[in-house]
Image (cartoon, rainbow, N blue to C red):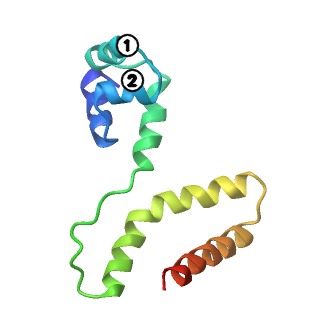
């Protein structure tokens, strides 16, 4: 990852150089050097993983139906939810238990909103 790609990654994650430095307790000069010369090799996969976990904002909030809104939301959340399930399974939770728990959790959130 070169400096330009690092700056693009920061932008995609919603960081300025100074906010990234603050958030991760780095010296601003270090982040500025990375923006000029590229970050250390180990950081590129971490930034790419962070980018994969970002959730894009909706195209608009004027959907044709509640189903259309849910479909767009499902698409936006897919990667994050898949990652959550994979991490829980990796930790030893059976996939079926994880998925049932997510359904129960989501159902409780919908019910409490009414």
Question: Tag 1, which secondary structure?
Answer: helix
- Point out residue 106 in the picture as x, y percentages from the top left corner: 56, 75
Residue 100 higher or lower than 28, as above or below: below
Q: Which of marks 2 and 1 is nearer the N terminus?
A: 2
Structural distance between the alpha carbons of marks 2 and 1: 8 Å
Confirm or deny contact between disc 2 and disc 1 (CB under 8 A).
yes
Q: Is mark 2 on a helix, strand or loop?
A: helix
Q: Name the residue under label 1.
A: 30
Residue at x-position 74% and y-position 51%: 91
- The residue where tag 2 is placed is 21
Q: In the picture, residue 44 is in which quadrant?
A: top left
Mark 2 Cα shell of 10 Å, populated few (<14), some (14-19), many (≥20): some
Q: Nearer the viewer, mark 2 or mark 1?
A: 2
Q: Quadrant of residue 73?
A: bottom left
In screen coordinates, is 91 left or right of 85? right
Number of residue marks: 2
- What is the quadrant of residue 38 in the picture? top left
Q: Residues within 10 Å of mark 1 (few under 14, many from 20)?
A: few
Q: Is residue 70 above or below residue 95?
A: below
Measured as percent of width and height from the top left, residue 6 is found at 31, 28
Nearer to us in this view, 114 or 90: 114
- Residue depicted at x 23% and y 86%: 64
Could you say where residue 66 lies in the image, as x and y percent from the top left?
34, 86
Q: In what quadrant of the picture does the N terminus appear?
A: top left
Name the residue: 74% across, 71% down: 97
Q: Residue at 32%, 35% (x, y): give it.
A: 15
Give the vertical position of 90 relative to 42 (above or below).
Answer: below
Residue 41 % position (x, y): 46, 21
Front residue of 112 and 45: 112
Say which mark, if any, is on residue 93: none
């Amino acid at each position: 990852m070169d400096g330009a790609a690092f700056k693009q990654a920061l932008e995609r994650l919603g960081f300025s150089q100074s906010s990234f430095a603050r958030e991760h307790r780095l010296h601003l000069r270090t982040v500025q050097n990375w923006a000029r010369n590229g970050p250390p090799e180990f950081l590129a996969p971490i930034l790419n993983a962070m980018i994969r976990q970002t959730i894009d904002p909706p195209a608009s909030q004027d959907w044709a139906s509640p189903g259309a809104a849910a479909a767009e939301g499902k698409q936006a959340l897919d990667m994050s939810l898949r990652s959550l399930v994979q991490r829980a399974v990796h930790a030893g939770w059976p996939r079926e238990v994880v998925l049932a728990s997510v359904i129960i959790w989501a159902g409780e959130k919908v019910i409490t909103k009414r």
